Image (tube, grey):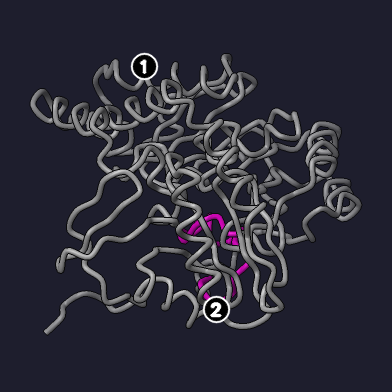
């Protein structure tokens, strides 16, 4: 009997080994990873510097609570502020993207004294109570979650946003740097600039969810930086520690901390910090943001013309290939026949969230496989 709660649709593949952009299953079959486990693998599987840092930390101390000093937390905060250019921001550490968004929403409400939130159609911010309330997917919102005061508007509609903010009761606007689950939908740069101006004008907190689109994936550390804006709160997780559970909120200096207002048991633990510090160093040393942009552009330029493909869009190593038909069979063929991992958004989009170390030679393998299947 399988005692696991059956909530996942599982492929018949058992990964047992991985390195760089490659995965091997229990039969010795090699696969090209163009999905990075939901954008989690940022510096490649089992990067030697990353593995060494985590192993070394395990030999020292693995865990103690946040009631003591942990210099690794301060080191990570310094590195993230340096990589992002937000040198006057503060970091609060948690365990996941959903938890990061929960705490950002809470901070916004504390800061403004208000309780309504504006979010966007197509948004995905997590599955916990507050995060799922600002997620535009009724299938995963339980009746318990429906009490939250959330208004959804269309992406890139500044007039709709201003209409809501002018009512005076909004604590925060939350938006993804790029909608991932929603189908690689990119807020246009002018809309992002308008959004920043409108939130400042009405005294509303702007939260940028960079859980999937952050950590250098688009060629800048955060996707919103392409628009040249600076949000009040930025949430991150997935690629931050290359697979160790971690999340964080970067917080504007305008926010004041009160002892006990936020808290977590496992957030900022030694193992996660060692992994995240190593990832930050590797991204910088190996110039992986530039690689993500260059190789991502190469993907976009080389997707084959086909009547089955409706659109191709993305930034850096965050690419969506939208089809005119359901893509379940194409995705299965890529996995079982061509041995390439890909993701999906909705029914008709292949989602590519490869490790930032993906090469143009890797892309050629994917492109040739896709051409053959089409």
Quadrant position of residue 207: top right
| Horizontal side, residue 144 vs residue 114: left or right | left
Relative image position of residue 129 (x, y in whole percent): 48, 59
Q: Residues within 10 Å of mark 2 (few under 14, many from 20)?
A: some
Residue 148, can we see it? no
Identify the secondary structure beneath mark 2: loop
| Horizontal side, residue 201 vs residue 4: left or right | right
Relative image position of residue 99 (x, y in whole percent): 44, 47
Query: Residue at 42% across / 39% down in the picture?
Result: 357
Residue 277, can we see it? yes
**Magenta residues (range):** 124-141
Residue that numbered label 2 is attached to: 327
Q: Is residue 129 magenta?
A: yes
Residue that numbered label 1 is attached to: 75
Identify the secondary structure beneath mark 1: helix
Q: Is residue 75 magenta?
A: no
Q: Are marks 2 and 1 in contact (CB under 8 Å)?
A: no
């Amino acid at each position: 009997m399988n005692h696991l709660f059956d909530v996942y649709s599982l492929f018949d593949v058992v990964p047992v080994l991985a390195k760089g952009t490659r995965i091997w299953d229990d039969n010795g079959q090699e696969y090209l990873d163009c999905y990075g486990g939901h954008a989690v693998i940022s510096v490649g599987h089992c990067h030697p510097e990353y593995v060494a840092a985590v192993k070394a930390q395990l030999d020292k101390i693995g865990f103690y609570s946040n009631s003591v000093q942990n210099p690794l937390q301060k080191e990570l905060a310094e590195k993230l502020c340096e990589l992002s250019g937000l040198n006057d921001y503060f970091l609060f550490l948690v365990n996941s993207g959903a938890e990061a968004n929960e705490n950002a929403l809470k901070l916004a409400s504390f800061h403004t004294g208000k309780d309504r939130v504006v979010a966007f159609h197509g948004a995905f911010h997590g599955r916990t109570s507050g995060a799922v309330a600002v997620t535009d997917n009724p299938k995963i919102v339980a009746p318990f979650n429906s009490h939250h005061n959330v208004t959804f508007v269309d992406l890139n509609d500044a007039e709709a946003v201003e209409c809501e903010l002018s009512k005076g009761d909004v604590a925060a606007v939350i938006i993804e740097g790029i909608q991932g689950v929603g189908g690689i939908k990119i807020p246009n740069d002018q809309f992002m600039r308008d959004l920043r101006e409108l939130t400042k004008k009405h005294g509303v907190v702007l939260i940028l969810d960079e859980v999937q689109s952050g950590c250098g994936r688009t060629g800048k550390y955060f996707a919103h930086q392409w628009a040249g804006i600076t949000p009040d709160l930025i949430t991150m997780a997935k690629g931050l520690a290359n697979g160790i559970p971690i999340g964080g909120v970067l917080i504007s200096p305008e926010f004041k901390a009160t002892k006990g207002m936020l808290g977590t048991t496992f957030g900022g633990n030694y193992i996660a910090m060692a992994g995240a510090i190593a990832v930050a160093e590797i991204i910088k040393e190996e110039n992986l943001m530039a690689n993500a942009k260059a190789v991502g552009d190469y993907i976009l330029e080389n997707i084959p013309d086909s009547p089955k493909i409706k659109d191709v869009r993305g930034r850096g190593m965050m690419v969506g290939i939208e089809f005119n038909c359901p893509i379940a069979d194409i995705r299965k063929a890529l996995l079982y026949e061509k041995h390439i991992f890909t993701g999906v958004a909705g029914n008709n989009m292949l989602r590519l969230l490869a490790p930032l170390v993906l090469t143009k030679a890797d892309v050629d393998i994917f492109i040739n496989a896709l051409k053959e299947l089409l």
